[in-house]
């Protein structure tokens, strides 16, 4: 009670608790973010965060671009800019997207403060409380944080080794419509999925676009990893064959560096107009300095060659991860991605990846539990392993430590069950594709 005898507003920790908008309740720290404080300790091998290996980017490329921008365009670089983005950079973004079959006009590109910001702007424009976003199960953790912050419901459609399952999508749409739900868009990461690592086949891309057209559902295509393939490119982007029903999100965070915070949205004309207004309302304009530096880099550096260098770095690390899994945990199942940053591991049914994480950190290895990637708390039997940042040597050390934790957990469960050790004998079995149901 306060001095006037009225109930005390708020909580002991936050006196403004009852003053927040209802939608603020959807803003919660993700399990990935919560891991960073622990996983950043130097003695911990972190297979948790999806941080690009920016050390593979020669510093002189960026330094030279910065110097030229400041010498030649300093007054512009340090000033406010357009809410849609620097025209020259938008033209260059067309060249980047052309590598995945997209033909577009620079007027339909909106530069944002990272593609994460573009995702937030699209959600702001489309989502009302109670609306439904359809997404793969599992799905990108921070996308779900955004959707929940706008009080939307998330409906997960299952995946297999070829990505989102079209027939399951049809069933989910029918069920949602029968329940009177408003479906606002389908959110998908079709190429080298985060967290599953799988890629949506070309045939399924076309079928899913047809399903979306039949049901008047917008497709939000998030493509941060598409150019980071290993043995062969991913199929062309969904936006390459559908202009009016797809909003495409891209970023320089994975192919250059995340510190610039520059991404973009390619949207149908009417949506683009509203995205520009929303962008101006949120940030006035994306950073002129960052945009001009990236534009200079794209103009003067061998950016395609640099992307190829990143591919080699990540391919080597993926092979190190799969090799270590095959050696230390051959009885488990995992995906074998052809690009991107992630492997999706399936544990024995008795184990809980979230409950096991504190013990893993004690053994100086970190991962992201599968529960972070489901809105409904599913995923206890899974974990995401990121191979993008640690060295191949550290990846091997991390998997050896993880194997120790998993086997200790199984032995502990066996002991309490009174059955003795039920540890599976090594079978030498590596899964090139995930089980039929990734959840």
Image (cartoon, helix red, strand yellow):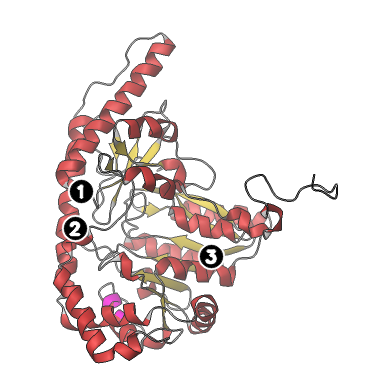
Quarter of the picture holding the C terminus: top left
Q: Residue at x 32, y 52 (%)?
A: 198
Q: Give how far apart the Cα atoms at labels 1 and 2 are.
A: 10 Å
The residue wearing badge 3 is: 185
Q: Position of residue 123 (x, y in %)?
A: 54, 67
Residue 403 in the image: above or below residue 292: above
Q: Position of residue 130 (x, y in %)?
A: 66, 58
Dot 3: what SS?
A: strand
Q: Residue at x 20, y 74 (%)?
A: 62
The residue wearing badge 2 is: 230
Of the image marks 1 and 3, the number of the one nearer the N terminus: 3
Q: Nearer the viewer, residue 228 or 402?
A: 402
- Residue 258, quarter of the rendered image: bottom left
Q: Which residues are magenta?
A: 93-97
Q: Residues within 10 Å of mark 2 (few under 14, many from 20)?
A: many
The residue wearing badge 1 is: 318
Q: Give how far apart the Cα atoms at labels 1 and 3 are.
A: 32 Å
Dot 2: what SS?
A: loop
- Residue ranking furthest to the right: 5
| Drawn side of residue 277 relative to residue 57, left or right | right
Q: Residues within 10 Å of mark 1 (few under 14, many from 20)?
A: many
CB-based contact (under 8 Å), mark 1 and mark 2: yes
Residue 352 in the image: above or below residue 95: above
Quarter of the picture holding the N terminus: top right
Q: Is residue 82 visible?
A: yes
Of the image marks 1 and 2, the number of the one nearer the N terminus: 2
Dot 1: what SS?
A: helix
Q: Residue at x 28, y 83 (%)?
A: 92
Q: Is residue 68 magenta?
A: no
CB-based contact (under 8 Å), mark 2 and mark 3: no
């Amino acid at each position: 009670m306060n001095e006037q005898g009225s109930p005390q507003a708020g909580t002991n920790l936050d006196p403004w608790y009852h003053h927040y908008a209802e939608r603020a309740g959807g803003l919660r720290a993700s399990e990935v973010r919560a891991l960073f404080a622990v996983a950043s300790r130097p003695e911990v091998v972190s297979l948790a965060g999806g941080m690009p290996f920016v050390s593979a980017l020669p510093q002189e490329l960026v330094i030279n671009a910065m110097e030229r921008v400041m010498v030649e365009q300093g007054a512009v670089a340090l000033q406010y800019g357009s809410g849609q983005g620097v025209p020259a950079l938008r033209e260059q973004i067309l060249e980047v997207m052309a590598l995945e079959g997209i033909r577009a006009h620079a007027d339909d590109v909106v530069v944002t403060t990272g593609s994460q910001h573009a995702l937030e702007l699209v959600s702001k424009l489309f989502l009302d409380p109670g609306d439904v976003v359809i997404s793969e199960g599992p799905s990108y953790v921070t996308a779900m944080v955004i959707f929940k912050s706008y009080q939307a419901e998330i409906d997960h459609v299952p995946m297999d080794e070829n990505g989102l399952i079209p027939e399951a999508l049809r069933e989910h749409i029918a069920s949602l419509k029968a329940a009177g739900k408003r479906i606002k868009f389908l959110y998908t990461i079709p190429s080298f999925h985060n967290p599953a690592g799988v890629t949506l086949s070309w045939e399924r891309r076309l079928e899913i676009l047809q399903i979306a057209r039949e049901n008047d559902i917008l497709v939000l295509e998030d493509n941060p990893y598409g150019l980071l393939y290993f043995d062969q490119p991913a199929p062309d982007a969904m936006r390459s064959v559908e202009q009016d029903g797809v909003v495409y999100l891209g970023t320089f965070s994975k192919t250059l560096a995340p510190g610039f915070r520059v991404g973009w949205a390619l949207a149908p004309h009417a949506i683009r107009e509203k995205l520009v207004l929303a962008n101006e309302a949120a940030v006035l304009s994306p950073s002129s300095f960052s945009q001009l530096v990236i534009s200079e880099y794209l103009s003067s550096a061998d950016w395609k060659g640099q992307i190829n260098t990143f591919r080699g770095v990540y391919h080597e690390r993926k092979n190190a991860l799969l090799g270590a899994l095959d050696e230390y945990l051959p009885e488990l199942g995992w995906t074998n991605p052809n690009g991107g940053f992630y492997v999706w591991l399936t544990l024995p049914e008795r184990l809980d990846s979230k409950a096991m994480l504190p013990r893993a950190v004690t053994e100086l290895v970190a991962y992201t539990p599968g529960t972070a990637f489901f809105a409904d708390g599913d995923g206890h039997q899974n974990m995401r392993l990121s191979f993008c940042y640690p060295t191949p040597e550290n990846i091997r050390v991390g998997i050896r430590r993880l194997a120790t934790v998993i086997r200790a957990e199984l032995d502990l469960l066996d002991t309490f069950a009174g059955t003795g050790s039920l540890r599976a004998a090594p079978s030498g079995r590596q899964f090139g594709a995930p089980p039929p149901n990734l959840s």
